[in-house]
Amino acid sequence: EPLMTRLFEHRFRGGALDGHAFGNLFIASLVGVTGDLEQAVKETSKVLNIRGRVLPTTVRDVVLVADLEDGRVVEGESQIPAARGRIRRVRLRPPEIAPLPEVLAAIAAADLILLGPGSLYTSVIPNLLVRGVADAIRAARGLRVYVCNVMTQPGETDGFTAADHVRALEAHAGPGLFTHVLVNTQAPQNRALLARYAAEGSHPVAPALAELEAMGLVAVGAPLVSEEEVLRHDPVRLARAVLDLWVAATGRPRRPRRRPRRARRAPAARRSPTGTAPGTHRPGETVPP
């Protein structure tokens, strides 16, 4: 539901919770209640009535650390963008973190693997730093697609093009991670929204399609942005673009949508001379074949 989606994506501004996402706090609270991250994710899926499975990359306690170009070292997902420094690299502490075996199995069996959209350095890349995950994605036989963000994120991707996003991914996880890049090519037109984002240091991500192609990737551009209240991916457009890309790349036809069956109206029952409605029978009467 739109309200629940907005709620779980909401980030607090100011105070002790500044920068924290409600969704993360909700899961953290469930971890406190259940005592287990994997169980907390399962319970979240039940609460939100999620179809499919949601798997945490790892259930180990880990700290995200960023090395900034100015020499500073910043710890914590919310603290990294707040430092407002150009990020040189992010890493996990401790570095050798084992993934859930189910995660590697799901990657190997997947027909389609999507990375993103999401915060590049604090959401997408950290999953690739868990031991074996990047190699599993590279070895997967399914289609591997990176969905690039539509807007830059202050303190993380200031001034980044789509090609810069890919370079950052490859710097952390190595080349050959994905085969396709899906980027937004629709320039937002809502001036009020653009001005609000610009005041916070966020701007549309330039598609850089030619540069992506020069990097050996299949770059697919499409109008993907939604301009209702916030500038982000339109979920319907994005889903359609992903399906179209998958069909074009694999040659498999898209499954037709199932239309709900309409209940047939029973004909009006007219009384017959024998006292029963047409198509009905008295108890004990033989029904003709």
Image (cartoon, helix red, strand yellow):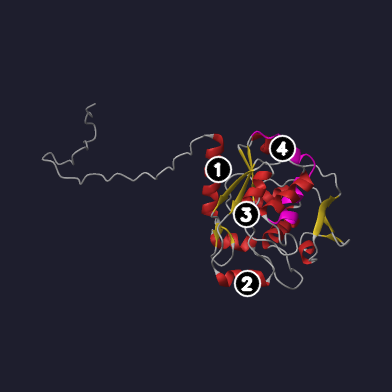
Disc 2/disc 3 C-alpha distance (Å): 21 Å
276 and 176: which is toward the camera = 176
Query: Marks 4 and 3: CB-CB under 8 Å?
Result: no
10 and 248: which is toward the camera = 248
In the rendered structure, which disc, 3 or 1, sits on the residue that comes first in sequence? 3
Camera-near label (3 vs 1) is 3
Q: Is residue 162 visible?
A: yes
Q: Position of residue 90 (x, y in %)?
A: 81, 53
In the rendered structure, which disc, 1 or 4, sits on the residue that comes first in sequence? 4
Question: Mark 4: which secondary structure?
Answer: helix
Q: For mark 1, what is the residue? A: 245
Above or below: residue 88 compared with residue 58: below
Disc 1/disc 4 C-alpha distance (Å): 19 Å
Q: Residue 67 falls in which quadrant of the image? A: bottom right
Residue neighbourhood size for the residue with mark 3, other residues' Cα within 10 Å, grouped as few (<14), some (14–19), many (≥20): many
Camera-near label (2 vs 3) is 3
Q: Position of residue 82 (x, y in %)?
A: 77, 66
Q: Position of residue 9 (x, y in %)?
A: 64, 61
**The N terminus is located in which quarter?**
bottom right
Question: Mark 3: which secondary structure?
Answer: loop
Q: For mark 2, what is the residue? A: 196
In the rendered structure, which disc, 2 or 4, sits on the residue that comes first in sequence? 4
Which mark, residue 207? 3
Query: Which amino acid type is marked by label 1?
Result: Leu
Which mark, residue 84? none
Q: Residue 257 falls in which quadrant of the image? A: top left
Q: Which residues are magenta?
A: 117-141
Q: Main secondary structure of the magenta part?
A: helix
Question: Mark 1: which secondary structure?
Answer: helix
Q: For mark 4, what is the residue? A: 138
Query: Which amino acid type is marked by label 3?
Result: Pro
